Amino acid sequence: MNFDQEHVNQIFVTKKWAREWSGFSKKANHRGFVVGTAFLVDASDAAIPGMTLHIQSRVGTISANCLITFTIFQRIDLVRHRTYQLEICPFEKFSHKGVEIIYGPHEHTPDGKVRAVRKRGVNCHDWYGSLAWFLGRTNIEYFDVEQPC
């Protein structure tokens, strides 16, 4: 199986459901972070090959130092390709160096673009608002994910 951008774009706009949410646990290779995962399935409840949801958060810090990533990966053979990511951090924090320098929350979209996200509720102080915006943006049916900290 090869990475197919058109296929990823189609998956991105199609309704999906998360299954077998792991809950949060300490990240083995990075102290201070927790991570949770789920498989993504289509309308027929069949697993979408290689597609997984990962939510990672820094714990034990005040919200002014938050770092949360909501990511969809597609695994092809041994390589995980990031197909979408929403990164939440304080608005004043330098968060992405590229053609455009970005401070604060931003997204990496399936078309390879990086955009600042300035939507109501998408911030360090609103876990459930950020989660709901991510799930809506990626067409994943809402499911309850406990706040990690």
Image (tube, grey):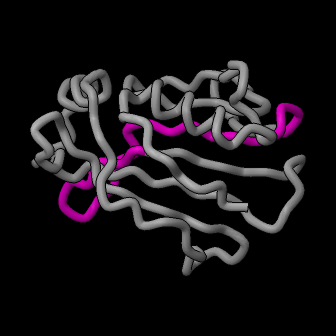
Q: Quadrant of the C terminus?
A: bottom right
Nearer-the-camera pick, 117 or 145 = 145
Q: Quadrant of residue 131?
A: top right
Image height of 36 relative to 76, above or below: below
**Measuring 69% from the left and 35% from the top, which residue is drawn there?**
97
- Measured as percent of width and height from the top left, residue 56 is found at 58, 57
Image height of 75 relative to 78, above or below: above
Image height of 27 relative to 67, above or below: below
Question: From the viewer's perspective, is 144 left or right of 90?
Answer: left
**Measuring 39% from the left and 60% from the top, which residue is drawn there?**
21
Nearer-the-camera pick, 126 or 93 = 126
- Measured as percent of width and height from the top left, residue 87 is found at 63, 40
**Measuring 11% from the left and 47% from the top, which residue is drawn there?**
46
Number of dots carrying numbers: 0
Nearer-the-camera pick, 39 or 141 = 141
Q: Which residue is the extreme one toward the front?
A: 144
Q: Which residue is the extreme one toward the bottom?
A: 28
Per the image, is 89 magenta?
Answer: yes
Nearer-the-camera pick, 13 or 116 = 13
Image height of 18 relative to 16, above or below: below
Q: Main secondary structure of the magenta part?
A: strand
Per the image, is 100 magenta?
Answer: no
- Measured as percent of width and height from the top left, residue 64 is found at 89, 47
- Measured as percent of width and height from the top left, residue 116 is found at 67, 23
Question: From the viewer's perspective, is 119 left or right of 50?
Answer: right
Q: Which residues are magenta?
A: 72-93
**Measuring 18% from the left and 61% from the top, which residue is drawn there?**
77
Q: Quadrant of residue 80?
A: bottom left
Q: Quadrant of residue 128?
A: top right
Question: From the viewer's perspective, is 112 left or right of 118?
Answer: left
